[in-house]
Image (cartoon, rainbow, N blue to C red):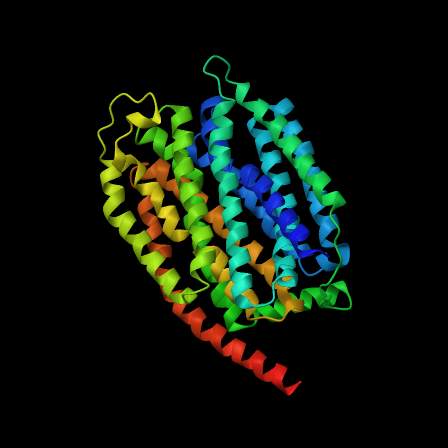
Amino acid sequence: MRKSTVKIAMYLNYFVFAILLNSVGIVILKSQRNYGVDELQASILEAFKDLPIAIVSFLIASFLPRIGYKKAMLIGLALVSVACVSMYFGNSFNTAKLLFATVGVSFALIKVSVYSLIGTVTDNQQEHNSLMSSIEGVFMIGIAVAYFLFPAFNSEGNPDAWLNVYWLLAGISLVSFGFLFFAKFENQTEIPGVDLADDFKQMFKLFAKLLTIVFVISAFLFVMIEQGIMSWLPTFNSKVLHLPENISIMMASILAISLAIGRLLAGVITKKVNWIWVLSFCIVIAMLIVIFVLPKTVGLDVKEINSLSDIPLIGFAFPLVGLFIAPIYPLLNSVVLSALPKKLHSSMTGLIVVFSALGGTLGSRVIGYLFKNEGPENAFYYTLIPMSLLLVSFFILKKLTSDSTQVLHVKNVSH
């Protein structure tokens, strides 16, 4: 198995699914305008995306090495290609639900495969941290592309014109399918159990560890923050800043670009600076942005807006929170996976994806509820609660992973 080929396949698959998964905020906005649903109804799209990710990840994570990571990723790409074409012809809120459910199922296959393969193409924790951050950075670049891709297909005169983007997305998925199909893989992953029942037992044994419990809570809290902001930023831009639809969507790309830059930088910085200090600094700055920058954005007196250049500079400031929350997710994942034997990476990845998906669903539903009942100008303040809890969890994880690494080192020496 050539490591470079596998890495390219990882990057390409993550790029495709970044566009599909994180178009949910755009489709939430379009659903309110085209399909006549309110904020709370529209927020259910996040659940249709995330719950299938959680369920499928739980069911197949430990079993996936038997199926084969390459085959699992090919199935995922084939499914989303069909779903994209179906969205074009369906053109309804129910079809949007079906689209995101299919994307969720497929991404579970992709993410568990990619996270499990990282351990086979890296040799130490520094390399693992770097590759994990780079892959997640490429994911954020894909999200940023989505915020320009969808407006490119929008038309004021034709409310259905935006659906043409799904032909392009189906095409990109098929290109990724073709590249992956011809890529050479060798299964170097140790299969964790002798049968399916034993595979599930491995996952539940992991969950009995304090390290796992603290980590999955941390992953849950982070995705609550990230998805809550990302899914509702286009609506925030439209309803609070009163921006035109296309500009509202494109403005949300600032968050995605900030996330991408933050994760790519983290891949470099963590080679020289311990992860605990990187994450602690980042979460504190993110909290300060919510406390001091968001109020000025909400109180912005916006005049007529015809292009991005017409928006006052402070309007660009809040999405920069992405630069500081960006390193949290990939570094937490990398730290915990590096502390475990490689044969348990697939099981742990299943738990990562399950609780990430649940966090994303809850985050979007909470923000949707707050948008409707507390007003869109107040909804994002709730993120201070999970941010505070995350800061505490970092130091608990630092102690637990240090203890775990020392135990593994002693075992290796004794062997």
Inspect this view and state whether residue 232 appears. Answer: yes
Q: State the residue in front, 106 or 408.
A: 408
Q: Quadrant of the C terminus?
A: bottom right
Task: Identify the residue at horizontal 21%, vertical 29% (top origin).
Answer: 301
Q: Is residue 75 left or right of residue 222?
A: right
Q: Position of residue 66 (x, y in %)?
A: 76, 59
Q: Report which quarter residue 173 is drawn in.
A: top right
Indicate whether 131 appears above or below 379. below
Task: Identify the residue at horizontal 25%, vertical 27% (top origin).
Answer: 302
Q: How many marks?
A: 0
Q: Quadrant of the N terminus?
A: bottom right
Indicate whether 326 appears above or below 203. above
Q: Position of residue 288 (x, y in %)?
A: 27, 52
Q: Position of residue 264 (x, y in %)?
A: 46, 51
Q: Report which quarter residue 208 is drawn in.
A: bottom right
Query: Residue placed farthest to the top in the image?
Result: 157
Task: Identify the residue at horizontal 75%, vertical 59% (top origin).
Answer: 187
Indicate whether 53 appears above or below 165. below
Indicate whether 156 appears above or below 97. above
Query: Residue placed farthest to the bottom in the image?
Result: 414
Inspect this view and state whether residue 379 appears. Answer: no
Q: State the residue in front, 90 or 2.
A: 2
Q: Is residue 171 left or right of residue 151?
A: right
Q: Position of residue 222 (x, y in %)?
A: 44, 54
